[in-house]
Structure formats: C-alpha cells, structure tokens
C-alpha cells in the first residue's frame, strides 16, 4: 500500500484545495491530511485565518479524499509524521517547490501544480476590505506599532496625529504615512484608531474616536479612573464598536498557555501570585518627568495586575500600596499587595529600582515560575514538592509582540472572535479602578 501525506491550513476551503487533495489521493492508496492548528499558524506568521480548526477539518473530510486527518501543531512535525505513519510520498502544491526537498531523505517528495487564480489569502481579501488605521501619538510605542501592524493582513496604517505638528510630520515621513494635525480629518479618513499618546490623554481620544464611530485599540493603561472605563466600554457596546485595551501580554500565545496550565489543577488551587516588572528609565523620559501621571505604577502596573486579575478575579478584599519615591515625590518603586478570598498577591513595579522580571504562581500542589521577561511569556517551569520533578513549557513571542493584540482586535471587528476573553471589559475596568485608587492615595487625584 502506498501511503501519501499532505499538509495545509485549508482556510475558506476552495477549488485549489479540492484539486490538490484529489490528486494527492491519486498518488497512492491511502491519504493522510495534516491540518494546521490556529496556534501553529500564528507561530509561522499566518495571522488571519478565518475558519476554526474544526471547520477546516470538516471541509477536508467532506471531500472524501482523506483516509485519515491529523493535526499539525509544531515545526518539524512533518519528518516525524513520515516516520510514524510509514509514509511513501510527501506532497504539497508547487508554491512550495524546493522548500521540502530535504524530505527526500525520508520519502518521495512530489510538488503538485498549484491551481491558478485562487487562494485563501485572495478570498480573505475579497471578503473583507482593508481597515485603515489612524495612529494617535508618535512616541516609542507608536514606533513599535508600525512594523507590527504591517504583519497583520486586513489593516493598514493610514496616518498619524499629534497636536505637535513637527512630531506628526517626522513620524509620518519615517513610516511613509500621512500626517494629520486636525483630528477631525484623521477620523474622516480612517476606520480604526490606535491610541499611544500620554496616559492622561487616552480618555479624551478614546471618547472622541468612539463618538466618530471608530473602533479603538488603546495602549495601557487605557484610563486612570473606573468610571471613565465603564463609560467608554458602555458607549462602545451600545454603538457596536470594539474597544480594546492594548496590554500585549494578554494576547500573546505564551501567556494564554500559562493561564491554561495555571488553571489546570496541576499546581492545585492557586494561593499566591507575585509579578514584578522593572525597567530603569532615563531621567528625562516622560514617565519620570510627569509628576501627576508618570511613575512606576501607572507605567508598568497594568502588566503586573494582569495575571493577578486573570487568576484571582476582579474583586479583591484589600489592597495596600508601599511606595519608594524619588526626590520629587514620584513613585519609582511600587509594591501593591492584595488579599482575595482565595489567596494573596503582590505586584512590584519599578522605574528607578531594578529587580528580576519574574512571575511566580504558587498553589496547593506546586508552583509556576515564568522566566524574565515574564510579560513576553516565552518560558516557564512547573515545580513540585519533589524538587527533581520539573515540567518545562515554552512558546514563541515574536519581536515586539503587538501583532497578537492587533490580530485579536481585527478578529473582533470582523466578528471572527466573538469573545473578549483574553482581556475582558470587566478586567480592564478593575485595572482602571486600581490605578485610580493608587493615584488618590498618592495625592495626585482628588
Ligand atoms: N493549493 C493549491 N492551489 C491553490 C491553493 C493552494 O494547490 N490555488 C495547495 C497548497 O499548495 C497546499 C494546500 O493546497 O499544498 C493547502 O494550502 P493552504 O496554504 O491551506 O492554501 P492557500 O490558498 O495557499 O492559503 P494562503 O493563501 O493562506 O497561503
């Protein structure tokens, strides 16, 4: 019996897929089809797959050509599959010609002529117009956003706004987009808005963007008051608009995996979380110059609050802030200590004190340590009472990682994702409430 294997995403199943599978089946007596998981597609940079894995598998099944369907979840799986399933022929479309020649060491490789003028990419583009994004703010984060947005299909940067004309111009020149010094003009030209301006301006910009019917992705902390967060989310919901707080960790694959493992019961019930994020800043950076809204907690608190709120919930019993101030009275190191009904947690943020950027999650049966920088969540270990037993997990985090939140934002707009479970409105509101409490205690808000 000649066994054949082929792989693909098979998104928006089309004639090219059908013909490929038909010919693959004819190459032998038994055809195995590997369908990629969503996570594997994200890892290899395919960020806008529309159909779920189950739908894609169903569509392959319906053709009747596959004798067996498996899932492809990791790089390097193909060679192992060839050995495991005693494969005689590996085949893919001619768009891959040459790329899989190395597989000749294990089985015969056949590239089948690709069907012309059809692809999933083409169908995705036809189904959806490209959303034009307006960027508000021209600082460091906006500069990180630009290369990342280019990697997500279905969205393109249209222009940038900054009340300081010169900054907008420079940014626009650097990234080859339009510069706007009139916000109304920007709103007129775009579908979605990305806000990366100073914290205290977020509320006004988010509100104005929503009132102009734009979907909004706003950098963290979205706002610094609970009431404002509630108001903005309610407005967005009532007007069918998507409002996302951009805490990149929440959307990255490693963090999703971490939450899954932490909640799986392998460390028992979670009783303690300790998250630390410090970064030494130059004295002349906005975070240290802005005496009202700057400082370590407003800058980094969102990251440290994220695992705490995700794992213990939005409602804490008590919160206490211990703060180290600089000579001007600004917090350069903040420890927020929480008690919850189920356990306790600490969040450490520093701009003027350096510590290890580690996340620890302790439970009744073991603990998880996420290696620094935990907010990129690439590697973590699970430890138990028996110190010789360690489970290790790793995940990729590509470049600045903003692509993950942009992709989820887009999927929500296009209704491919129907849930904001990675960072819910309630969680964002809770974080805004904690920021507000901190600023009040610091005497910066009345
Ligand atoms: N294929 C083909 N003819 C096409 C499109 C795809 O023969 N017009 C083949 C590919 O070469 C591959 C298989 O079908 O062997 C699955 O391809 P997949 O990547 O899922 O489909 P594409 O349409 O190429 O997807 P995308 O546009 O997202 O790259």
Image (cartoon, rainbow, N blue to C red):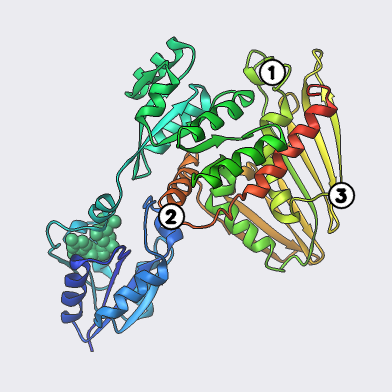
Label 3 CB, ligand 1: below 8 Å? no
Q: Secondary structure at mark 1?
A: helix
The quadrant in which the N terminus is found is: bottom left
Residue hosting label 3: 317
Residue hosting label 1: 288
Name the residue rendered at 64%, 58% in the picture.
259
Q: Earlier in the sequence, mark 3 or mark 1?
A: 1
For this view, does 91 lie left or right of residue 317? left
* Disc 1 crowd, CA 10 A, few/some/many (<14, 14-19, 20+): many
* Disc 3 crowd, CA 10 A, few/some/many (<14, 14-19, 20+): few
For this view, does 431 lie left or right of residue 37? right
Label 1 CB, ligand 1: below 8 Å? no
Mark linked to residue 415: 2
Ligand 1 is in which quadrant of the figure? bottom left
> How far separated are the C-alphas under marks 3 and 1?
31 Å
Name the residue rendered at 69%, 63% in the picture.
263
Q: Is residue 74 among the parts visible in the rendering?
A: yes
The quadrant in which the C terminus is found is: top right
Report the residue that reaches farthest toward the bottom: 1
Residue 436 in the image: above or below residue 177: below
């Amino acid at each position: 019996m000649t066994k054949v294997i082929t792989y693909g995403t098979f998104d928006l199943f089309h004639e090219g897929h059908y013909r490929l599978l038909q010919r693959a089946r004819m190459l032998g007596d038994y055809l195995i089809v590997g369908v990629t998981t969503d996570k594997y597609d994200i890892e290899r940079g395919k960020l806008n797959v529309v159909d779920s894995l189950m739908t894609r598998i169903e569509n392959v099944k319906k053709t009747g050509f596959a004798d067996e369907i498996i899932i492809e979840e990791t790089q390097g799986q193909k060679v192992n599959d060839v050995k495991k399933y005693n494969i005689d022929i590996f085949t893919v479309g001619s768009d891959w010609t040459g790329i899989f020649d190395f597989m000749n060491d294990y089985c015969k490789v056949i590239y089948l002529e690709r069907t012309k003028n059809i692809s999933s990419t083409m169908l995705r583009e036809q189904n959806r117009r490209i959303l034009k994004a307006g960027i508000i703010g021209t600082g460091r984060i906006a500069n990180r956003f630009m290369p990342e947005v280019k990697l997500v299909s279905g969205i393109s940067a249209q222009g940038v706004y900054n009340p300081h004309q010169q900054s907008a111009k420079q940014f626009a020149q650097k990234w080859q987009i339009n510069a706007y010094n009139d916000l109304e003009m920007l709103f007129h030209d775009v579908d979605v808005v990305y806000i990366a301006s100073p914290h205290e301006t977020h509320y006004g910009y988010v509100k104005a963007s929503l009132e102009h019917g734009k979907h909004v992705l706003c950098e963290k902390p979205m706002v610094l008051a609970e009431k404002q967060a509630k108001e903005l989310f309610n407005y967005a919901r009532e007007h069918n608009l998507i409002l996302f707080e951009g805490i990149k960790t929440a959307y990255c694959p490693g963090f999703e995996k971490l939450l899954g493992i932490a909640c799986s019961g392998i460390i028992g019930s979670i009783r303690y979380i300790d998250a630390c994020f410090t970064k030494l800043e130059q004295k002349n950076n906005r975070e240290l110059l802005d005496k009202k809204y700057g400082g370590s907690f407003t800058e980094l608190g969102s990251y440290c609050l994220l695992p705490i709120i995700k794992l213990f919930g939005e409602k804490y019993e008590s919160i206490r802030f211990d703060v180290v101030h600089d000579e001007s009275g600004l917090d350069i190191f903040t420890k927020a200590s929480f008690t919850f009904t189920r356990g306790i947690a600490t969040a450490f943020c520093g701009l003027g004190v350096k510590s290890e950027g580690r996340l620890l999650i302790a439970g009744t049966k073991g603990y998880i340590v996420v290696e620094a920088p935990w907010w990129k969540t690439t590697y973590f270990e699970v430890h138990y009472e028996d110190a010789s037993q360690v489970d290790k997990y790793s995940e990729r985090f590509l470049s600045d990682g903003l692509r993950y939140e942009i992709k989820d934002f887009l999927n929500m707009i296009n209704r491919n994702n129907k849930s904001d479970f990675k960072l819910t409105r309630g969680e964002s509101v809770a974080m805004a409430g904690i920021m507000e409490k901190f600023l009040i205690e610091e005497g910066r808000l009345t």
